[in-house]
Image: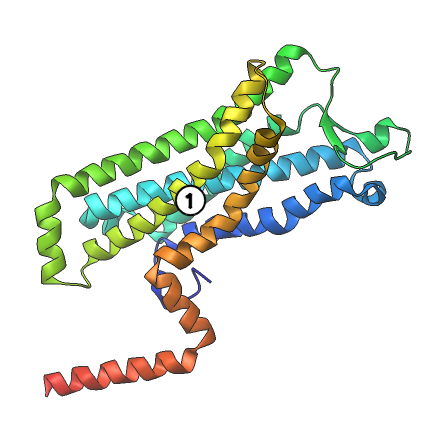
Amino acid sequence: MAVVGPTFQDKKRPFLLLFLAADLVTLVAVVGIQLSEFFPKTWPVLWRNDSQCALHRFGRFLTNAVTVYIMIAISVDRYIAVVHPFSYKTECTPKRTKYVLVAIWLLCALLSIPAAIKFKTKFALLDLKVDSGGDACFLDQSAPVWFRYSLRLYLSFAFTLVPATITGLVYTVLLLHVWRHNREFSATIRSSKESSSLNQWKIAKVLLAVYLGFMFCYVPYLIFQFSISFRYRVPGTFANISILLPYANSCVNPVIYLLWSESFRSNLRFLFLPKSNDTKTNRSVKTSVTVVT
């Protein structure tokens, strides 16, 4: 709903569409299959072979990677739109946006391949006999110790630390630019409430809130992964919360759009109250005609 309304009919719409689509796939498909691990009756279908286990792990980290790396692309897009608005109009074309999205998907697919290596299913290990639920898919304990710890570090860096750092740096530079040019921004706001720079800055603030929500959900998971890698004891409650929070991030993003984005609320009205929107449009047109005459 955040991208179907008229407000997002522009170059940033593909980024937001795939960003929210990855959240939707995570919530519906990935989390649904993940929950099936706790129901052994589903194992003969969903967790029968090691290849199914590897495919699930690949899809799980692929959707995660798409979300975080599109977040990087969005932050760079907002930076160019706010800091270099004229270059943004000429250089950031829809065609180039599509190329960037294809490159992101290919990069995320490559990054997700190691996440599926050495995973096995309990169903196949027990010779088709199921005893209890949970951990239907697990990392093969016969794998070398160096591989297991290296995999945890790799996943932490590739899917959380690196993208979070890059996105944070971009938004920091963006905020510093706005702060340094605060007087110019204030003059722009007073001169035109519908100015391009003001609209781009409003969008950047919403996406900054999305980034902060991402950090809130992924930092505990990052701490958990590093603690395991360096053999520190982690309380069970913190471990469970840190594992569940990344999935909760897919739920947090729509809430942030709802609370922070005026365009999101207008798109909701566009979807569910089209008549009221037509009425408002007609009123605005009549008002403008009256002023002109």
Percent position of residue 291, x then y: 12, 84
- Does 171 appear above or below 192? above
Secondary element type, mark 1: helix
Q: Is residue 225 left or right of residue 75?
A: right
Name the residue at 24% across, 51% down. 201
The quadrant where residue 189 appears: bottom left
The quadrant where residue 74 appears: top left
- Does 275 appear above or below 107? below
Percent position of residue 104, x then y: 46, 39
Q: Amino acid at mark 1?
A: Tyr
Residue 153 visible from this viewpoint? no
Name the residue at 40% across, 55% down. 257
Q: Is residue 38 left or right of residue 170?
A: right
Residue 277 vs residue 241, the one in the foreground = 241
Name the residue at 64% across, 45% down. 31
Residue 50 vs residue 109, the one in the foreground = 50
Residue 255 vs residue 198, the one in the foreground = 255
Q: Which residue is mark 1?
A: 99
- Does 208 appear above or below 232? below
The quadrant where residue 39 appears: top right
Percent position of residue 216, x then y: 44, 38
Q: How many marks?
A: 1
The scheme the figure's colours follow is rainbow
Name the residue at 35% across, 58% down. 261
Percent position of residue 213, x then y: 42, 43
